[in-house]
Image (spheres, coloured by chain):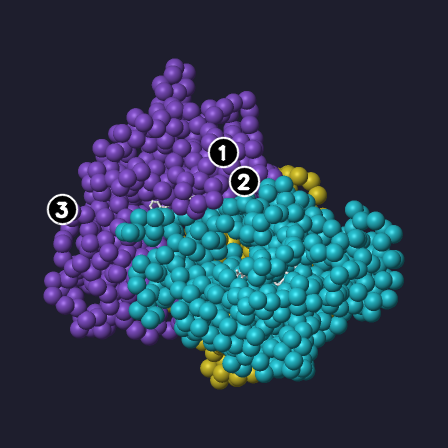
Amino acid sequence: MSTEAGSGLRDDELPGLLRGSLDHCVKCTICETACPVSNVTPLFPGPKYCGPQAERYRVADEPSVEWSVDYCSGCGICTQVCPQGVKIAEINAQARNKIKREHGVALRDRIITRPTVLGRLGTPVAPVANLSLRLRPARILAEKLLGVHREAPAPRFAGRRFSRWAKRHTSPRTGRKVVYFHGCGTEYYEPWEGEKVVALLEHNGFEVEVPKQDCCGLPLQSSGLFDDARRTVLRLARALAPFVRDDDTIIVGNATSCTLMLKREAREILGLADDPALKRVSERTWDICELLLDLHDRGELRTDFRPVNETIAYHAPCQQQGHFIGKPALDLLALIPGLEVREMTARCCGVAGTYGLKAEKYEIAMKAGDALFTQIRASGAPSVACDSETCRWQITHATGRPSVHPIDYLHRAYGL
Amino acid sequence: MRRELHFDAVVIGAGTAGLTAGARLAEAGARVAVLTKGVGSTHLAPGTVDVLGYAPERVSEPGRALEDLVRSRVDHPYALVGRGCVVEALQWFGERVAAGPFPGYRYVGGLERNHLLPTAIGALRPSALIPETMAAGDCAAGGASAARVCVVGVRALRDFHPALCAANLERAGVDARSVELNLALDRADQNALGVARRFDDPGWRAWFCAELSPHLRGEERVGLPAMLGSTDPHGVWSDLGRRLGRPVFEIPTLPPSVPGMRLFEVLRSSLRAAGGRLILGAEVVGAERSGERVSSVQAHAAGEERRYLARWVVLATGGFASGAIELDSRWVTRERVLGLPVRGAPGADEPRFVSTYLDEQPLARAGVAVTGDLRAEGVENVLVAGAALPGAAAWREGSGEGIALATGFRAAEVVSEAEGARAGQPGRSEAVV
Amino acid sequence: MVTLTTDVLVIGGGATGAGVAWDAALRGLEVVLVDRSDLAEGTSGRFHGLVHSGGRYAVKDPPAAEECVVENRVLRRIAADNIEDTGGFFVTTPWDDAGYADRFADACRATGIDCEEISPAQALREEPRLNPRVSRVFRVPDANIDVWKTVWSLARGARERGAHVMPYHAAVAVHRDGDEVTGARVRDMRTGEETDVRARVTVNAAGAWAGQIAELAGIEGVRILPGRGIMIAMNHRLVNTVINRCQMPTDGDILVPIRTVSVIGTTDEHTDDPDDHTVLQSEVDAMLDDGEKLVPGFRQARALRVWTGVRPLFEDAKAAETLTRDITRSHALLDHAQRDGVGGFLTITGGKLTTFRLMAEHTVDAACAQLGEPRACTTASEPLPGSETQRSYRLGERLERKEAHLREEQLICECEMVTRGALEEAIRRSRTANLDDIRRLLRLGMGPCQGGFCMYRAAGILHGLDGLGAEEANTALLEFLQERWKGIWPILYGDQLRQVRLDDWIFQGVLDVAHLSA
Ligand SMILES: Cc1cc2nc3c(=O)[nH]c(=O)nc-3n(C[C@H](O)[C@H](O)[C@H](O)COP(=O)(O)OP(=O)(O)OC[C@H]3O[C@@H](n4cnc5c(N)ncnc54)[C@H](O)[C@@H]3O)c2cc1C
Ligand SMILES: Cc1cc2nc3c(=O)[nH]c(=O)nc-3n(C[C@H](O)[C@H](O)[C@H](O)COP(=O)(O)OP(=O)(O)OC[C@H]3O[C@@H](n4cnc5c(N)ncnc54)[C@H](O)[C@@H]3O)c2cc1C
Ligand code: SF4
Ligand code: SF4
């Protein structure tokens, strides 16, 4: 049992409020109707069962008696739809964490949850790394040794790092500062997304600062490695906090799951509600589409959009929905002349971060996303917009359709 | 920067009342955000629009009974909106279903007469406007059919017990029998939605019908738990009717409710189609007032609360069931979202409940105090709709969805009328809502 | 009228009566056990759930404490499957006399209670929701016990040894043949049929109703002063250790985690009628306030159900010195041959659930003496059916079992994890059509939704089994709804009110049970 220096929180202590929220459950099953995992596999009994129901049988000092909760992907949809305010996904996360503590964490989970390490290793040798990620024998080996499913969507290392570009880039001094949190996906795999974000922000009069930064710890958290996750997110919070001392500057990010980690999950799931630096960062963090639509609502967004004559499918990923800000991308994309956007109503692509990479979960994740994939195929749209990178990789993997962040279309429409 | 969003109207709650108000407002051109903690009762309720089932005797002509009610109970939500509004709201709803996301799916009926629909235990429940998929179950005199009812269940579905249903229908004078199929599903604890997803698959339907057909006899109509498809109810229902060669109907059962989820989807897509925003997870936790007006509401969001500024607020939070109105452990009743006064709650030393469960409970009719046009007492720009209103014990009357639909509809109208009048004033140039 | 003949007739099927039946059957006697309603429907089924360590009585009543110490150890051996070893704390809160703690520690030492003082910080680590302002904490071997399971295993064990167990049979007359009691006439409360039970010894184990039975036997002065107490079950385990206030025993000073809930109690109000189940709002308020002192935030937690039990406090109206009665201060065994010159009749009352086995032992000793057949008691070493392995109960058991059969076992009551198989077996075995009996047997419908989801399911299953008519299934459902309402409405606020609204919609909306044809 370890104590996290910064948090003063014991790893095995379910924050009282989370557990207490089970009292609000009226057993209505609404969460069950929305859970992408329990809908496709009988191995997972679902959010109502694993969350508020099973929690009444869990005693802190006694060993876990169930495994099935490990099939929860942590997508968080259940918490979003629950009309009574039960923190279902969070309760599940704690139960999973306890199982991990009792039974140890697979080597695989220790590796795939560290994008920074992977990125640093992969970037300099990108061609080789990318090749081996695509070579069947290598993938089979990885599945056997590591339990990473051979078919699972694997991103390509870009071979360059966004932060290098950012260091060389100088943002025009407008005095209206914004701090850009780019996350690991942009850093190692999609640096061009970061460049677009910077361009969009500058186009709208912002001076963009890119502090030195690291992983937010979300993959660690979702795999139940809470201690490591706490250390990681606190390190990031310490790095970002000095930039948002004043009340005007905000942090903006395009990695929607990582911004959610900063905004909420670290505080609620990891029980870090009281850390002052994290609190500051959490309150000052915005999703990129949230910010742009907000600017638009105030009449401050430039709308010099050129037509983009295309039809696209838009999927709001679970983590984006976890921000509780609606679907700002939809309203932004609607500003682009000529662009026809089909809203996908299926909730989840199944991958949930690293869940869908795991050999024993891959099939489930693919099935969980099936409703979405079917909708995308039926929509007739040749490409997909989606706010989260892992979800995009999964969607492209499953449907064969290219997928981009919604800001790509804004970037194009601005003609930047 | 602060998180502040500006709208013409903010609707709190995404049940029938809130979604109806939101969709109507958006259709009238307003910038609308529907803020909601979670989804509402739609996912639980049968999906029928019951206008008035008991008053307190069983009602067979809801239109007529409604008129009496409006006269005799001036504090009743229906009295606040009037019969005409109910008619319009039903009409509007019917059109939205027809234009909605489920091709061919429609509702039947109206205020002329109540259908009598078998419940899962075999009582007969009066309802005015019902999904077509339930129509063949009508057991009212002069109803769809007098043919024998064959109630069909699947043993793996713990939420439906066909034998008990049929036995009680018999006791109510309906010729009925039951069949229970022992189909293997892949899990022990299946709910109606899980089975509905299987019905989406034509192959499964064919197999199901092949299993069922040998058990059917003569001119029966076939009652199944409400689980006929999750994405294409009209297609699934018609297909089953064709394959079985008999009328087929759905019997609503324990939550989750498949027809109720369709109702939600119809209203949600109407809202979206008209440009309204739906923000899930946005529990409203406070409000700012300026004088007699609520100027903004604060809603929960990840990281930091967001302020929504709006000229109008529609409170459609569902009342006690959602916790928006609360009786606390010190026996104080309060409206928790905007801190509005509550009407109809028993006083500190009056009984709140009586000891016989099925009697009317004194607390039953409590709700947010409103004036004649649904405005919250003491606040000019807050309208109240749905189960948050006082004056009805809807579960005893069979009037829940009817009230939610009609008052949500009316709330939008009140806003539009007021904005219209305002825009008509000289010197105003803001967009007409 | 049917006539039964037996060695021992036991009137009253609470823990005491069932304990007597088990003990007598183990000693090879023929036994008939009757209760006017279901077993453990009296005080036993309405108690607080605590197997006392003795701590509560250490200062006030040392002999009672000593009995608890012994019986606590015995019960853990013989009824392991029904007992969860939660351990207990005695805590000094800011509202308690600080001087009591030292007296308490001394008294524990003197009475042999296994008591260890720990630091408040340690206690808070173990029980994070405990009031951080406690100043002293003592650890004692408190435990909880599932009384229904216990009474049923006693009855089952007795039955397996030939006893005749008759729930829903009330003693309506006690037969006297001169100076001898020769048995009783019992009436089936469901059918009205009567049975004559001829017995060599009749044991009055009717708890708070013992005075009424003594009167039927024409014996005077057995006065029971019923003391009514309320308890409130909270929706989940706020604590996993029994929490006692370290002070002279008073109201609302114990919080017991038992099964999935935690129970705050209790009060002590004099009442004239043992069947008085009034719950006053002032009592509810007092309990919630007391809960708040032990666990801050208690009032925000969800209250599930309230119930009352009546203590059988015995007061002998006959002059004390003329009695030769087996006296411990905690329970009363009256040998009416000695007390009143009436043979074949014993009254056992008072006491605690923790000491039911000891009470039974003394009673059956006296019965054997009356029969002139001394036989040794073996209940202190013979495990109850189901407890043979001596493994004590753990909260996670039902979850673990369901997990092992995730895809095969259908849950009917989701909150309390009652499977279809368990329900069907209980219906068959108990031959009851009363869902409230099944509730106690299995905890069906005892969780947060209070039957909102499982009662329709259970009624359907009940109807399907053994060709029970729809009418009986409907009645079972409606009676259950009324029965649960009794325990809900006096504490209905907060989260539970949301639940009741949903349940109202399920029963009165979706199912429309109020309009089932009569
Ligand atoms: C099981 C069940 C069966 C029913 N059966 C029938 C029937 O047979 N016939 C019939 O006519 N009616 C029935 N009803 C009732 C009917 O569904 C309701 O009366 C009606 O839907 C009420 O709608 P509403 O929109 O007012 O409230 P609700 O549907 O309860 O919606 C309330 C909304 O407010 C939201 N909310 C609450 N607090 C906040 C907050 N602070 N911030 C943001 N959002 C908030 C909730 O998340 C929810 O979305 C049934 C209801 C249930 C639950
Ligand atoms: C509020 C409260 C809390 C308590 N908490 C605890 C605790 O935590 N720990 C503890 O050890 N003890 C506790 N006790 C004490 C304990 O519950 C009782 O001492 C014990 O249950 C008594 O059991 P019994 O079998 O003697 O009586 P009962 O259980 O009352 O049994 C008597 C039976 O006689 C039956 N009967 C009555 N009349 C007739 C008739 N005419 N014919 C047939 N049958 C009849 C009744 O139906 C009843 O079932 C508590 C008591 C109260 C009141
Ligand atoms: S949605 Fe919320 S209240 Fe409903 S069953 Fe799930 S956790 Fe319970
Ligand atoms: S977090 Fe996602 S996968 Fe887990 S229970 Fe909730 S909805 Fe299901």
Q: Quadrant of residue C338?
A: bottom right
Q: Measured from the top left, where is residue B64 in percent x and y?
A: 22, 33
Residue B345's tag is 1
Q: Quadrant of residue B34?
A: top left
Is disc 1 in contact with disc 2, using a CB cutoff of under 8 Å?
A: yes
Q: Nearer the viewer, residue C153 or B335?
A: C153
Q: Quadrant of residue A344?
A: bottom left
* Colour given to chain C in the rendered image: cyan
Compared across the picture, whether B246 is left or right of B299 comes to: left
Compared across the picture, whether C272 is left or right of A76 comes to: right
Residue picked out by circle 2: B327
Q: Which residue reaches farthest top?
A: B426
Q: Relative to residue A344, is residue C204 depicted above or below? A: below
Rendering quadrant holding ligand 1: top left
* Colour given to chain B in the rendered image: purple
Give the chain of mark 3. B
CA separation in Å, label 3 and label 2: 45 Å
Task: Tell me the amino acid under the disc marked 3.
Answer: Gly
* Colour given to chain A in the rendered image: yellow
CA separation in Å, label 3 and label 1: 41 Å
Is disc 3 in contact with disc 2, using a CB cutoff of under 8 Å?
A: no
Residue picked out by circle 3: B142
